Image (cartoon, rainbow, N blue to C red):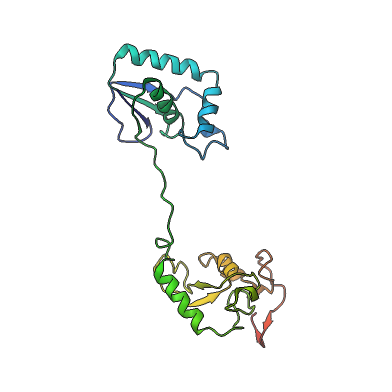
Amino acid sequence: MDIVSFGYGKRPRPYADLIIDARQLPNPYQVPALRPLNGRHPKLQDWLISQPATQPFIDEAIKRIQESDARAVAIGCNAGVHRSVALAIIIGQHFSAPVRHAHLTTKKKANTTSLGYGHQHQQHRKKLLHNMKDGEPCWWCGLPMFKDKAKNWDGKGLAADHVQEKGARNRQDAERLLHCNCNSQRQDGRNDPLRPALTGRHPSEPLGSEPVKPLVVGGFNWK
């Protein structure tokens, strides 16, 4: 016998000799702490089992499976992520049956290459560092930049930055260096109007929309 979980709101729906509808049970999705989890997580399974209606539901499901002699059993809930997944695992353990999940997907984390920060980006950073002179002002905050990270205001190594918004995702080459924290503050360019070199704030302070005072570094007014 095979057991599969699925979501009623998703397609394609798996073939089954017997379908068990778990939508009547309390939904972990309604619990903020459980919403990000899926039915594989022990915490979610423990919560579901603790609900008064769950054990009678499981007992009845096991009875139906035994009486039907089904070879393929499908257990469904709204999205096929929480209840159906947990119940398929629990009931599958009872029968020592293989379990699969038709609609449970795991999001792949984006790696540095897919985000535009792979080997080529690192090579451009090395080139920018080689050509940089210590004390050059950071475009974002106006404070001096140094190859020795201990001398930078954030105590970190310099980051290669793309001048154009979303330049990394568009596979453009990095064109300048910024302090590491400054580069993080800039995001994809959406915060450019709030950069400290314009507002006069120190980059360690929260970004703000109102200018404080012009920031003068090395004789340059960065207002």
* Residue 44 to residue 140: above or below: above
Q: Position of residue 211 (x, y in %)?
A: 69, 72
Q: Position of residue 132 (x, y in %)?
A: 53, 83
Instruction: Identify the residue at the far right of this view.
Output: 212
* Of 215 and 63, the residue lying toward us: 63
Residue 111 percent coordinates (x, y): 42, 58
Q: Residue furthest bottom?
A: 219
**Residue name at image x 60 percent, y 79 percent:** 146
Indicate whether 21 appears above or below 128: above
Question: Residue drawn 69% across and 66% down?
Answer: 205
**Residue pictured at 48% horizontal, 15% vertical:** 56
| Quadrant including the C terminus | bottom right
Given residues 49 and 84, the one toward you in this image is 49
* 195 relative to 133, above or below: above
Image quadrant where one finds the N terminus:
top left
Looking at the image, residue 97 sits to the left or right of residue 158; the answer is left
Residue drawn 67% across the image and 67% down it: 204
Q: Position of residue 215 (x, y in %)?
A: 69, 79
Side of 42 relative to 196 (left or right): left
Q: Give 135 or 102, whichever is nearer the viewer.
A: 135
